[in-house]
Image (spheres, rainbow, N blue to C red):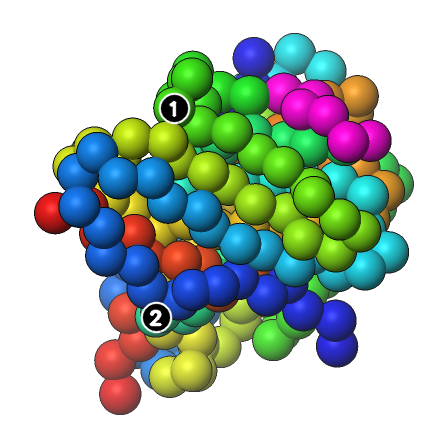
Amino acid sequence: EPEVTQTPSHQVTQMGQEVILRCVPISNHLYFYWYRQILGQKVEFLVSFYNNEISEKSEIFDDQFSVERPDGSNFTLKIRSTKLEDSAMYFCASSGTGMSYGYTFGSGTRLTVV
Amino acid sequence: AQSVTQLGSHVSVSEGALVLLRCNYSSSVPPYLFWYVQYPNQGLQLLLKYTTGATLVKGINGFEAEFKKSETSFHLTKPSAHMSDAAEYFCAVSESGGFKTIFGAGTRLFVKA
């Protein structure tokens, strides 16, 4: 069964450093998403991406965040200057044909900012 | 704007007992509704979804959910719990024409032997 692949599975970074979280969505999917889950809290929407541009973003997704689909397979989330409160599990997801399809999630990247 | 409320952050049942996880939603347009399951250290996996048509939907692992528009509910049930059902369950809502899905806070299901 097709999978969404995320790398790395764990990342530890110093406060103020830049991190790039990588995702390979399912190859024929058109919609891509990033969510985060702070330990013990709910799964929060960050951003959706379709047709090579951001289609919607949350208030969490401020100027320190950016997304990119640099080639036909990868989908990345960059956090420019990490803060302690960015520590969370970050999930990438993809969807075939929009909102009624449901998402396929990756296994997540656990980001720890120290 | 859409929102989701899951009643009960923790639910504990005995093996073989009925599982009932409650979800209420708010949406300004006819919603798409989903249940996802998350096992420890894994991503979320789609259990089932309601888009249109039959209001009782069946999913994987013997779970089903019923869309009740009058009650704005989408409760998840399973007639007989199994130890392997122990996990966190998330109800979610999205809207046609939108670009995001909103998740509830999750309900952790414990299954006692």
Given residues A7 and B86, the one toward you in this image is: A7
Which quadrant: the N terminus of chain A? bottom right
Which amino acid, mark 1?
Gln
Secondary structure found at label 2: loop
In this rendering, the label closer to the viewer, 1 or 2: 1
Give the magenta part as a residue range. Answer: A51-56
Q: Is residue B93 visible?
A: no
Residue B40 image label: 2
Q: Mark 1 falls within which chain? A: A
Crowding at label 2, few (<14), some or many (≥20) Cα neighbours within 10 Å? few
Residue A56 image label: none
Say which residue label 1 marks: A64
Residue at left offset 39%, top offset 35%: A79
- Residue B48 is situated, as x and y percent measured from the top left of the image, at 67, 56
With respect to residue B3, does B7 lie above or below? Answer: below
Using residue B13 as the reference point, say whether residue B21 is left or right of it. Answer: right
With respect to residue A76, does B70 lie above or below? Answer: above
